[in-house]
Image (cartoon, rainbow, N blue to C red):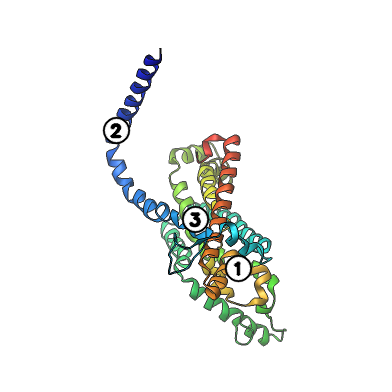
Amino acid sequence: MVDQKKTAGNLQRTKSRHSFWQTFWKYRVLTLMCLPAILFFFLFSYMPMPGIYVAFVKYNYRDGIFGSRFVGLQNFQFLWESGKLLTLTRNTILYNLAFILLGNFLAVFTAILLNELQSRWFKKVSQTMMFLPYFISQVLVGVLVYNLLNYDTGFVNQILGAMGKDLWQPYADSKVWPVILVLIYLWQQTGYNSVVYFASICGTDPAIIEASKVDGANAFQRIRYILLPSLKPTIIILLLFALGGIVKGNFGLFYNVIGTNSLLYDTTDIIETFVYRATMTDFNFSSASAVGLYQSVVGFVIVMTVNYVIKKIDPEYSLF
């Protein structure tokens, strides 16, 4: 009986190996097309993983990563003992929630509007104009914002002064910057994000659209009952991917627009900017690595939780 079980197990393993190689050979062209992506993730995502060890040592250049003294969880006290962990995490998550929710809403709205345009020439010009801000450097964005909002020579205060109004001091008022930063992000990213949704709309079967027109459906009914349901899988997948980075802030935007203005830190300081200032001052790479690991673990937990909830509601839209 035991020999029969072993024989059956060996046959099953042999069959599985043959099945794997048969499947691999059958889809060899598709596998070859995926090879660059596989190499990219292997080189830049999996090979650097041993570097996580830096978060648990007191790193120094002379001894290297694995020769440095092991200190356990001591580096994770970097954020906790600073007293800013909750504030930094709150700011990072709330900004990212605004970026994700408002950004995706505007991207879907823009894609639908572009799809409803009848003039192909105007549609292409509109797409190009909305796409251009994405290619503007964050450094240049910071310069533009400063020239608009500067107290002494800013464009806004020049207009207010000419109208006899009191001058505005945004760089001394931390409460206005959440709105300003969200608006800057939406201006720069909406055109780029709408491309994915517009491509998904273009993939909708034209016969369905034509049939709805024949049945008397107006534009709003077509959007509600055809376009939005067709966008649902894309929206859910992109939201899942975005939630994975919800504790990773947009360092380029915040650092170049806010800089080192301590008056605004209450509402604009995120994990990345705080770590940057700390590491560039103290050169504490172990603490920076600990923060990166903290962000990755939290992001992983969020993605797994959201994916589990979606799988319970509708398994077709879950990642796995």
Q: In this orientation, does residue 53 appear?
A: yes
State the residue position of label 3: 194
SS for callout 3: helix
> Splitting the image into 4 quarters, where does residue 269 fall?
bottom right
Q: Is residue 92 left or right of residue 8?
A: right
Which amino acid type is marked by label 1? Leu
Q: Which mark is residue 181?
A: 1
Left or right: where 249 falls relative to 133: right
Is 188 located above or below residue 226 in the figure? below
Q: How many marks?
A: 3
Residue furthest to the top in view is: 1
Label 2 and label 3: CA atoms lie apart by: 40 Å
Determine the image quadrant of residue 181.
Answer: bottom right
Residue 70 versus residue 142: which sits nearer the camera? 70
Look at discs 3 and 1 and give the one toward the viewer: 1
Nearest to N terminus: mark 2 or mark 3: 2
Q: Which residue is at a point 65% across and 76% down the rendered structure image? A: 262
In the image, which is nearer the foreground, mark 1 or mark 2? 2
* Badge 2 density bin: few <14, some 14–19, many ≥20, Cα 10 Å: few
Quarter of the rendering occupied by the N terminus: top left
Q: Which residue is mark 2?
A: 21
Locate residue 258, reporting x and y percent.
59, 74
- Cα separation, mark 3 vs mark 1, equals 20 Å
Report helix, strand or loop for mark 2: helix
